[in-house]
Amino acid sequence: MSTASTGGTEAAPAEGPARPQSGGASAGTSLEGSIDAVTRRFSRGSLVYGLGTSLQRGIGLLLVPIYARYLSPAELGVVGIVLAVFSGFTVIFGLGLRGAVTRQYFDHVEDPRQLREYLGSVYAFFLLFGATGAGFLTIFGRGFFQTILAQVPFQPFVPLALWAAFFAASSGILLSLYRAREQAGRFVVVEIVSAAALAVLVVYLVAIRGGGAVGQAYALFWASVLTFALTLVLLAREARPYFNPAMIRSAVSFGAPLTLHLLASWALLAADRILLERTVPLSEVGLYTLGYQLAMVAGIVASASNAAWTPIFYDIAPRGQDSGRVLGRLATVNIALGFGASLLVILYGREAVALIAGPEYASAATVVPVIALGYAFQSLYFVSVTPIFFTRKTRVLPLLTGAAAALNVALNLVLIPPYGMIGAAWATVAAFAFLFVATFLAARTQFAVMYETPTIALLGALIAAGAFLAWWTADLSLLAATPLKLLLVAGFVAACARARLLSRLRGTADS
């Protein structure tokens, strides 16, 4: 399993490439004269990342009907907790090295031997740190986890999640290398292979062997082992065995603040399930997990757009005073893609639950539009946070995400007891909204992106209208609700067309 499943918040902190990437604006060339090339680059990257991420997550979504058929809501609740532990320790064992590699690749790219030594040193340190951490917690961590988890037993779930996190985090360095080179095809192949391995193992261990939640935990573990083996083979072509303390210190000093940031991001995405597990029956945790997985369709699109946006931002930002306006136009396209996906999930989440799950999961539909609304705010956050990474002001990120995570935990503690899973969903929305606002205010002093505020505000208003419509039509029949939903979708497409976003996405916008 790749670390991309941590929410996509690990936007790569970097300055612009040491030299223009293929298709970018060359030095001394007006950015306005190359806007078509820039937008085509963004479109190609978004398409490749989007297709790859969609296939990867789509494979995961194909497992949802299997879970709904072969697992009870309570067992799916256990799966949700295992995945939360897995994603959290993927961040811890990764130690922010993924972001460090994406940034520091450009410091070593001119010297291939030095780059190979750097990659080898960073990976060797990761193996030492991650294996030590996973082993220590497996042997001595029972008391700690029993304090945190009220209903899920330590054995076998926590050790399996810990070692799966270690093996899965190993792919982060390789994926960061591919991302820095804008090798989107290789990036998504690794992710798809990882997802396919998990899917096959889940089908075998859960559906065929009837292993229940334990079978899913073992599937996660063995899929991560296969990802680790694939990473070793591919990284051997890019790195040489090496252990340079100076290179390791540089990577760790860069990545450590990102670890705090990513842990806070994890708290935004997964702490709700931990807190639900301590307050409500596991069956309700399972319903929430199902609804959250479906809402993540919106997050797939936002993450794919962000993966293409980040290296292009680093390339374009240093290239003159026109860069702020060019990036502002691309930012609108990026946001519109995320907003469009969120709107579709908000409007049709109820139908998706009815299509793939049985009646015992019907109430999961209540959280889908709410979580999708949170992913709309995440789209805004992805765009607004990039200037902070670009200017290397990453030390502010733990403060921003930490404050948002603290708000999320506090709201969960307040809202879960009276409202259960819907309270957890609204806590997620509030936390993402706060994170976007705080990040935007902090980033605006770092780099002047000329955002197209009226267009973004209009699209945001349509998202809000979609959330209201989803609530208002919750008790209406599908036949009665469909015309209203189609009308709102048509309005969103018309707003994008009027702003010429569709032509920009094709790379045919006028300069």
Image (spheres, helix red, strand yellow):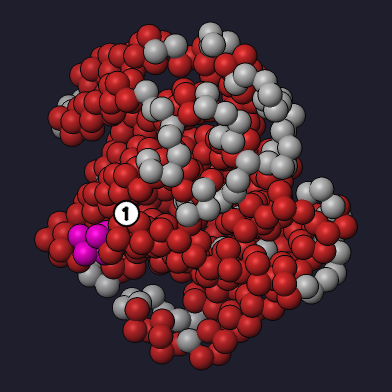
Q: Is residue 312 visible?
A: no
Q: Position of residue 473 (x, y in %)?
A: 18, 28
**What residue is disc 1 on?**
288
Q: Position of residue 44 (x, y in %)?
A: 64, 26
Say which of 260 and 161 sits in front: 260
Let me know if residue 85 is in the magenta part: no
- Give the amino acid at mark 1: Tyr
- Left or right relative to 500: residue 400: left
Say which of 402 and 204 sits in front: 402
Let me know if residue 410 is in the magenta part: yes
Which residue is pictured at 32% across the width and 25% down the height? Answer: 453
Q: Which residues are magenta?
A: 407-411
Picture quarter containing residue 57? Answer: top right
Which residue is pictured at 16% across the width and 59% down the height? Answer: 415
Which quadrant would the N terminus be assigned to in this image? Answer: bottom right
Q: Could you tell me which secondary element the residue under label 1 belongs to?
A: helix
Picture quarter containing residue 108? Answer: bottom right
Q: Is residue 389 visible?
A: yes
- Left or right relative to 111: residue 296: left
Q: Position of residue 432 (x, y in %)?
A: 31, 48
Q: Position of residue 276 (x, y in %)?
A: 27, 65
Q: In this view, which residue lies farthest toward the left? A: 418
- Left or right relative to 46: residue 472: left
